[in-house]
Image (cartoon, helix red, strand yellow):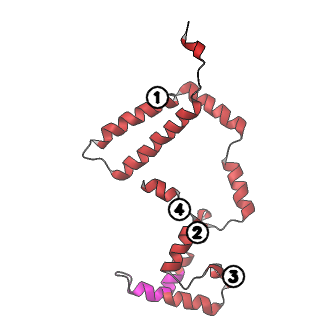
């Protein structure tokens, strides 16, 4: 249920949560280019004051806050992409219909069927739930894999003709 709740989280939900946690930042002020130096300095001072109220961070200063804010700016996974960049990366990540058909054919020829995978995962989950070492996070993740196998199994089911049952 937790994984499903996380998947249903929207950008609007996150924005509303941050507005309640940090009311100074309003919807129109999210870009650094829109802020003046005094606005940025005020935000930095507020962050430093906030840090000082948290156990273990009492000695954090403005330089620490600046370092924290700029820490991920050069990482490729943390860059801000334009709509065109997002579209290009999505197109590169998604295979074409021909590629996915070939991939599915290879998987079906060499591995278990979707129905066999579902049955195996269901059996494994039943066993894992009864173990003292079972972890709820791992259980949720395993259930998601089982649900994927179930969805794929349902997508490949073909309705048979009634004449198939009579010889």
> Does 73 appear above or below 29?
above
Q: Is residue 4 something one can see in this rendering? A: yes
Q: Which residue is mark 3?
A: 33
Q: Which residues are magenta?
A: 47-66
Please identify, in this view, whether the residue under mark 4 or under mark 1 is nearer the observer.
Answer: 4
In the picture of the structure, the residue carrying the numbered disc 1 is 116
Horizontally, is 116 left or right of 123 in the view? right
Disc 2 designates what residue?
A: 12
Marks 3 & 4, CB-CB < 8 Å contact = no
Cα separation, mark 1 vs mark 2, equals: 40 Å
Label 4 belongs to which residue?
A: 9
Secondary structure of the residue carrying numbered label 3 = helix
In the picture, the disc for residue 68 is none
Q: Vertical placement of 115 versus 136: above or below?
A: above
Give the residue drawn at x 56%, y 28%.
157
SS at circle 2: helix
Distance from the alpha carbon under mark 4 to that under mark 1: 32 Å
Mark 2 Cα shell of 10 Å, populated few (<14), some (14-19), many (≥20): few
Q: Which mark sits nearer the N-terminus, 3 or 4?
A: 4
Q: Quadrant of residue 120?
A: top left
Please tell me whether mark 3 or mark 2 is closer to you in this view.
Answer: 2
In space, the residues marked 4 and 2 are separated at their CA atoms by 8 Å
Q: Can the viewer see residue 60?
A: no
Residue 158 percent coordinates (x, y): 59, 26
Give the mark nearer the N terminus: 4 vs 1: 4
Residue at left offset 48%, top offset 54%: 4
The numbered mark, 1 or 2, whose residue comes first in the sequence reads 2
């Amino acid at each position: 249920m937790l994984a499903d709740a996380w998947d249903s989280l929207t950008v609007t939900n996150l924005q509303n949560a941050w507005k309640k946690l940090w009311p100074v930042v309003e919807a129109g002020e999210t870009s650094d280019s829109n802020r003046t130096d005094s606005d940025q300095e005020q935000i930095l001072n507020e962050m430093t004051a906030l840090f000082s109220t948290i156990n273990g961070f009492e000695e954090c200063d403005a330089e620490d806050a600046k370092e924290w804010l700029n820490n991920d700016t050069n990482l490729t996974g943390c860059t801000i992409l334009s709509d065109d960049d997002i579209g290009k990366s999505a197109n590169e990540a998604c295979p074409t219909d021909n590629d996915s058909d070939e991939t599915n054919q290879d998987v079906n020829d060499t591995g278990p069927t979707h129905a066999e995978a579902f049955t195996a995962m269901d059996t494994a989950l039943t066993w894992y739930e009864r173990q003292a070492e079972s972890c709820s996070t791992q259980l949720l993740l395993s259930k998601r894999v089982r649900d994927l196998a179930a969805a794929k199994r349902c997508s490949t089911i073909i309705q048979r003709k009634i004449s198939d049952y009579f010889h």
